[in-house]
Image (cartoon, rainbow, N blue to C red):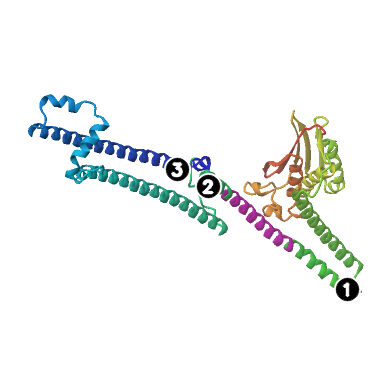
Amino acid sequence: MFRSLFRERQNRVIALTGIALSLSIVLIAIVTLCLSLEDHRRHLYEREVSIIGRLVSLGVITHGDVPKILSEEGSEDYEAALELLKPFGYTEEPPDSFEFSDGAFRSKVIIITSLSTITLVIFWFSLLILVAKKQSDFLKETSLRLDALMSGRYDSESVYDGEGDAAILSAQLYALTRRLEKTMESVNFERDKMRGFISFISHELKTPLASLKTMNELLIEGREMERERMDEFLERSGEDIERMEWLIGDVLNIARIESGAIRFSFKKADLAELAKDVARRYSEIAKSRGLKISVGAESTAMVFCDERWLSQALDNLVRNAVNYSPDGGTVSIDISRSEAYVCLTVADEGPGIAAGDAPKIFQSFYRGGPAVGSRKGTGLGLALAKAIIERHDGDIKLKSSNEKGSIFAIELPIRQEG
């Protein structure tokens, strides 16, 4: 009990102050009593001397009798004197003549004791009030801070410094405030992100769905439609369906990766071979547009990865490079390595990315300025690639960008299996 009580600094200060003042009051009372006792002793001494002097003056005793009187007395002297003084009202109890001396002394003792007791009671009662007020203020402050937290206000600060339970509780409440503030910021960010996601999805799906609906109605109504016109409608419908498949697939993949719903299967793989496989997927498209896709590797670049998902991330980068590069241009894939990392870069000769767009390029649904935003895409390819690379403990970034193209770099750690 005392250990927990004195754990609070203010309680220790109050207790030590109370003990010091209490000792001071007791010391003052003892000194006062000693002075009163000395005064009483002096009064008795003067009375005894006066009685002896009176006896000498009356001739009852002589100077030669004084040494005998001052010698050690016996009980028979008291009995003989009491017998002699009985006619004058003396008994075993002190007569009225002694009330002034003893009564004054007793009064002083009573007054000193009473004042000391009252002072100590008032003092300790005041200390209790002070401690209670401190605790009440702390509880009120804590209540106000909790009310602010429940109201969504996170501007409170830690008001109790030092040590003790109150300081610990205050520090924990402050930490809780900051944690809740960060949590709410994250919740608000995710809510705004979800609103943007819903708005984007509704917009991106609305256009192809409206197009499909229109073309479907035209196909139903135009039964005698020319074959060439019908093929055009079917081709456009296929493009819209493919666009919706990309969009829904990318959205689901990002959500599953970020939520941890996908379990990656890591094993050793050659990053150069993965890059060559991705490049082969776009060889026909590149040939039709006169594009050149080159893959250069310094040496075998073994990494510990999930081949399927890492291939998907590379595919997104290469697809963007092919889509944004002009006909007859070049898409370069280069691989280098250091002691700790393997670096893969994808360079294109597209319109580049404005400096103001660079920090946002990996955000979901962001498709850049007018120069690149008009190209076909969902705005999710780079976001998906970033999510995949981060699950591989790697990093993806826009290495450089200008009017003649952009370079994206992927860095993956070199790790041993297991």
Which mark is first along the chain, 1 or 3?
3
Q: Is residue 192 magenta?
A: yes
Q: Amino acid at mark 3?
A: Gln
Q: Secondary structure at mark 2?
A: helix
**Which residue is under mark 1?**
220
As measured in the structure, the alpha-carbon distance from the residue carrying label 1 to the one carrying label 2 is 72 Å
Q: Are marks 1 and 2 in contact (CB under 8 Å)?
A: no
Residue bounds of the magenta highlight: 177-202
Crowdedness near tag 1: few (<14), some (14–19) or many (≥20) residues, C-alpha within 10 Å:
few
Where does residue 207 sit, x and y in percent of width and height? 76, 64
Is residue 5 visible to the viewer in this orientation of the structure?
yes
Separation of marks 3 and 1 at Cα, in angstroms: 87 Å
Q: Quadrant of residue 17?
A: top left
**Amino acid at the residue labelled 1:** Ile
Q: Give the residue at mark 3.
A: 10
Residue 38 at least partly seen? no
Task: Check whether the beta carbons of the residues at disc 3 and disc 2 lie within 8 A of each other.
Answer: no
Which residue corresponds to the image point at 36% horizontal and 45% vertical from the top-left?
Answer: 120
Residue drawn at x 26%, y 42% is 92
How crowded pointer 2 is (Cα within 10 Å; few <14, some 14-19, many 20+) is rated as many
Percent coordinates x, y for residue 83 in the rendering = 21, 39
Label 1 secondary element: helix
User: CA gap, disc 3 to disc 2?
Assistant: 15 Å
